[in-house]
Every structure is written in structure tokens, then in C-alpha cells.
């Protein structure tokens, strides 16, 4: 939700970037944040800050987040809705129409450019997570599988390779997430080598998955 609101305010400022005040400065600028408020979402109550915008030209221009209008205390679980629509194959240009049908007047700020900014932030988060250090990590069990998303016909053979690990104290963690071609041996090899390059030195005592996975062909050599 915070990322979506930041994307909204960035687009708002860009729209008025050419407006200047009497001293030649940018007239529409960020000016801190409104007081934090609690919003009830599908995952419980979260605290959110909405950026505040100042219009130094004196025209009274104001920024209102389309996702969280003033005084609204309940969201539409947008944190889960936006990625879900994308994975279901809704194109960037079709997001505004789809969201307006679901959220009615609450979605006018979600332009294709806003959605593109959100997709970029998701990609950056994934890249940062995949690059984390795994030095000293130890897992006793792996659960592995390939998850397919029928987003577009030309991508029907692509899937997401998922690896979940259990630590010695029984805590489950997402260990690997990789873009694969079906569940091929080569795709699993790339995932396992990537984990090894980030410091995962020891394989598990037991790995669990279905028999069709290319994972099994490379697992023994990896450990």
C-alpha cells in the first residue's frame, strides 16, 4: 500500500513539474507526510503515512491518494489484489478498467504508469531478496515444486520454481524463488547454483517433491 501511494505522489508531482512559483522554484513539492493513521485491511490493522504536497503558487492544489482517500480507514486488500491481477494476465493498460470495476471510484489514480512503477518496485524487491547472504544457514528439509501461472499464451511453458526449507528448530522459510522453463533440470540447476553462490553450503537431510521435477537430476550432485 505504501509503495502504491508513493507511486501515486510521484506521478502527481511529475504532472506539475513545469509549474513554478514567483521565485522560479518548483511550485508543487513534497512537504513531509500527514499524521500516520491505522487502516483495517484483509491482513489486519496496518499503520500508513500519506505524503503531503505543498503548492507554493497559491492555487490551492492538493494531493489525495486514490488508494486511501482522506478519512478512509479500510482498504480493499490492494496489497494482494494488484499482483494477483497481474499474474492472472491483466495487462498494464487494462489495470485502470479492471480496478474501477472492482473498487469503483477508489481507483482513478492507478494509471498504467503507476502500475509500471509498482512492477518495477516488486522486481527490485525480488532482486534484493535473491541476492541476500545465506552464509551459515542450515536446512534439514526442502519442499520443492514448480508453480505455473497462465498469464499469456507465449509463456505457457514458464513456471516459478519454489523451494521452502525447514531449519533445525522447525521454522519454515522461503529459500528459493526462480523463473524456470517448465520444471527442467537446467532451471533447477540454475536455482541451486545461485543459492550456493550466496553462501548455502549444506544440503538438507531430506527433500520432498513430485517425481516429475528436473530437481532430482541435479540435487545429488549439488549436495
Image: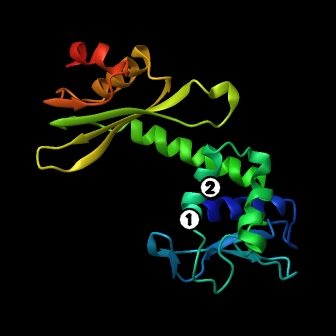
Residue at image point 20% right, 43% down = 166
Dots 2 and 1: beta carbons under 8 Å? no
Looking at the image, tell me whether mark 2 or mark 1 is earlier in sequence order: 1
Residue at disc 1, secondary structure: helix
Name the spot of residue 39 as percent of width and height, x first: 52, 79
Instruction: Measure the alpha-carbon separation of dots 2 and 1.
Output: 13 Å
Instruction: Assess disc 1: are there few (<14), some (14-19) or many (≥20) residues with their C-alpha within 10 Å of its C-alpha.
Output: some
Task: Please state if 41 lies on the left or on the right of 6 as rendered.
Answer: left
Name the spot of residue 173 as percent of width and height, x first: 28, 46
- Residue 109 appears in the figure: no
Q: In this figure, which residue is indicated by the disc labeled 1?
A: 2
Indicate the quadrant containing the C terminus: top left, top right, bottom left or bottom right: top left
Residue at image point 56% right, 65% down = 2
Residue 118's tag is none
Residue at image point 42% right, 14% down = 186
Q: In this figure, which residue is indicated by the disc labeled 2?
A: 82
Amino acid at each position: 500500500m505504501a509503495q502504491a501511494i508513493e507511486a501515486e505522489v510521484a506521478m502527481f508531482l511529475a504532472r506539475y513539474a513545469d509549474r513554478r512559483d514567483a521565485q522560479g522554484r518548483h511550485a508543487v513539492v513534497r512537504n513531509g507526510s500527514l499524521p500516520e493513521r491505522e487502516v483495517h485491511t484483509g491482513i489486519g490493522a496496518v499503520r500508513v503515512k500519506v505524503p503531503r504536497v505543498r503548492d507554493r503558487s497559491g492555487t490551492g492544489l492538493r494531493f489525495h491518494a486514490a488508494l486511501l482517500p482522506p478519512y478512509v480507514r479500510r482498504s480493499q486488500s490492494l496489497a494482494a489484489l494488484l499482483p494477483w491481477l497481474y499474474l492472472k494476465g491483466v495487462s498494464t493498460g487494462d489495470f485502470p478498467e479492471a480496478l474501477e470495476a472492482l473498487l469503483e471510484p477508489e481507483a482513478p489514480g492507478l494509471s498504467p504508469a503507476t502500475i509500471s512503477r509498482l512492477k518495477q518496485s516488486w522486481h527490485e524487491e525480488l532482486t534484493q531478496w535473491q541476492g541476500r547472504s545465506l552464509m551459515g544457514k542450515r536446512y534439514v528439509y526442502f519442499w520443492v515444486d514448480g508453480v505455473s501461472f497462465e498469464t499469456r499464451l507465449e509463456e505457457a511453458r514458464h513456471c516459478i520454481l519454489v523451494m521452502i526449507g525447514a531449519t533445525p528448530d522447525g521454522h519454515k522459510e522461503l529459500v528459493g524463488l526462480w523463473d524456470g522453463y517448465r520444471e527442467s533440470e537446467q532451471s533447477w540447476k540454475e536455482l541451486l547454483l545461485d543459492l550456493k553462490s550466496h553462501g548455502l553450503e549444506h544440503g538438507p537431510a531430506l527433500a520432498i517433491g513430485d517425481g516429475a521435477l528436473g530437481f532430482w537430476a541435479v540435487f545429488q550432485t549439488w549436495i
